């Protein structure tokens, strides 16, 4: 890494350390969601005012005009402090970047900066109960009505929908077309009449994901992103950004150093666990995987800096890092014995092995389940033949729903 990037890392680390007491993990302990979100909005505004939000965005939209590598370095340094940035990760990771790519200039100018400052939150409405991770299998309908559209149907697993002001959504506009066609991409006001959000309770007690119902929700045609019937391409652009943005080698779980510390403090048959062959194997495997993912990520960011678009290589990062996080979390809980099964409600998945293990399955579903990622890697990276698709080419309204 160049000296300039090392200087940037040192500068970011010092700035983050200066604000840890006011905004970090200890300051957040015991806060309810409303108080934590209020703290998060203050933190996001502070970052934006100091050039640490939207680091790679154009200054035209409030960004710092930096590079993707700088943004990745800042994200790496920020993660261990446990700052309340989680509420804005979806907004700034996928919906607003897609808005900046496809929306007219006046829309970009109106919505980019409030999102960057944490004043407005966006969500991404893709998954549905009958479609799972098959994005082309969605059934929520958008029907033309004058100069607008009427949306009817349901979405599921929508992160932060209960807090969101706006959302991007994929809808079926022509069911007589094959399933990858006849889809159109929109953005909408989440407070519009007919939108109902219901939280989904997760295994760890959290409720940051939701099911969302649309009962004859009207939106104007100027809230369409991309051409009518071309929404699948826009959605794939969104997913490529999402998978490359999910670039933490630990899968947003605890750092490997915490596992090493646990092995140093624990004994197996009267001897330090760090001397046990299975424990040493777990450490070596995790280290090898994380170094390989870091190399892929660095190569990707260099390509982006050279003008490339986010590609399918983000699928490798998401697939491997989330699986590795789940395996390492299980190994750490085994090391802890019965204490490993104690769930600390205020702990975060980045600092607590039980929280990490319970929430890892959600991470393996979000942004594409493992099976979808394996298909992407096989077909788009390795160049293997397509998986068997009996519904390929059939009009969508002739495909029987899966059960």
Image (spheres, helix red, strand yellow):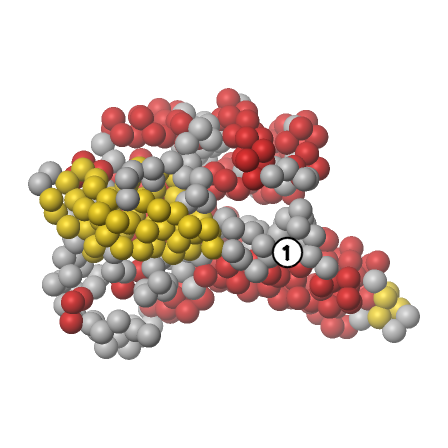
Residue nearest the observer in this picture, 165 or 377: 165
Q: Residues within 10 Å of mark 1 (few under 14, many from 20)?
A: many
Determine whether, in the image, residue 332 is placed left or right of residue 231.
Answer: right
Find residue 168 and report its image quarter: top left
Residue at the spot 41% in from the left edge and 45% down from the top edge: 161
How far across and down, in percent of the image, does residue 337 sit?
78, 67
How far across and down, in percent of the image, does residue 152 sit?
23, 52
* Position of the C terminus by quadrant: bottom left
Determine whether, in the image, residue 284 is placed left or right of residue 320.
Answer: right
Which residue of the protein is positioned furthest toward the top in this rendering? 49
Question: In this view of the protein, can residue 348 be seen by the observer?
Answer: yes
Above or below, 298 against 48 in this view is below
Determine whether, in the image, residue 154 is placed left or right of residue 63.
Answer: left
How far across and down, in percent of the image, does residue 146 sit?
8, 41
Residue at the spot 55% in from the left edge and 64% down from the top edge: 323
* Position of the N terminus by quadrant: top right
How far across and down, in percent of the image, does residue 137 sit?
27, 64
Find residue 193 and report its image quarter: top left
Find residue 154 and report its image quarter: bottom left
Q: Which residue is mark 1?
A: 355
Q: Secondary structure at mark 1?
A: helix
Above or below, 89 against 265 in this view is above
Question: In this view of the protein, can residue 66 be seen by the observer?
Answer: no
Residue nearest the observer in this picture, 268 or 12: 268
Residue nearest the observer in this picture, 41 or 1: 41
Above or below, 211 against 4 in this view is below
Residue at the spot 70% in from the left edge and 37% down from the top edge: 26
Residue at the spot 83% in from the left edge and 62% down from the top edge: 266
């Amino acid at each position: 890494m160049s000296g300039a990037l090392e200087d940037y890392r040192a500068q970011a680390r010092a700035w983050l350390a200066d604000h840890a007491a006011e905004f970090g993990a200890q300051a957040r302990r015991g806060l309810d969601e409303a108080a934590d979100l209020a703290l998060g909005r203050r933190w996001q505004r502070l970052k934006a005012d100091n050039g640490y939000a939207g680091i790679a965005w154009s200054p035209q939209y409030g960004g710092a005009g930096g590079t993707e590598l700088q943004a990745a370095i800042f994200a790496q340094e920020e993660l261990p402090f446990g700052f309340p940035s989680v509420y804005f990760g979806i907004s700034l990771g996928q919906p607003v970047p897609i808005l900046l790519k496809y929306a007219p200039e006046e829309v970009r100018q109106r919505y980019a900066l409030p999102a960057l400052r944490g004043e407005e939150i966006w969500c991404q409405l893709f998954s549905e109960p009958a479609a799972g991770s098959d994005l082309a299998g969605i059934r929520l309908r958008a029907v033309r009505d004058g100069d607008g559209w009427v949306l009817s149907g349901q979405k599921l697993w929508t992160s932060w929908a209960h807090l969101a002001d706006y959302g991007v959504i994929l809808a079926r506009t022509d069911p007589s077309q094959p399933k990858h066609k006849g889809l159109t991409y929109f953005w909408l006001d989440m407070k519009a009449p007919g939108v109902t959000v219901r939280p989904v309770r997760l295994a760890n007690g959290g409720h940051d994901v939701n099911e969302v119902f649309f009962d004859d929700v009207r939106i104007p045609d100027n809230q369409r992103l991309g051409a009518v019937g071309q929404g699948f391409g826009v959605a794939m652009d969104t997913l490529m950004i999402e998978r490359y943005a999910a670039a933490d080698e630990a899968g947003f779980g605890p750092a490997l150093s915490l596992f090493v510390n646990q092995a140093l403090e624990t004994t197996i048959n009267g001897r330090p666990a760090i001397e046990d062959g299975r424990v040493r194997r777990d450490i070596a495997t995790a280290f090898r995987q994380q170094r390989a993912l870091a190399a892929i990520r660095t190569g990707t960011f260099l390509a982006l800096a050279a003008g490339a678009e986010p590609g399918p290589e983000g699928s490798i990062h998401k697939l491997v890092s989330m699986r590795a996080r789940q395996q390492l979390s299980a190994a750490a809980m085994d090391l802890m014995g019965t204490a490993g099964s104690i769930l600390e409600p205020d702990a975060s998945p980045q600092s607590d092995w039980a929280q990490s293990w319970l929430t890892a399955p959600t991470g393996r579903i979000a942004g594409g389940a493992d099976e979808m990622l394996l298909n992407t890697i096989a077909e788009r990276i390795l160049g293997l033949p397509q998986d068997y698709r009996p519904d390929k080419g059939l009009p969508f309204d002739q495909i029987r729903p899966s059960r």
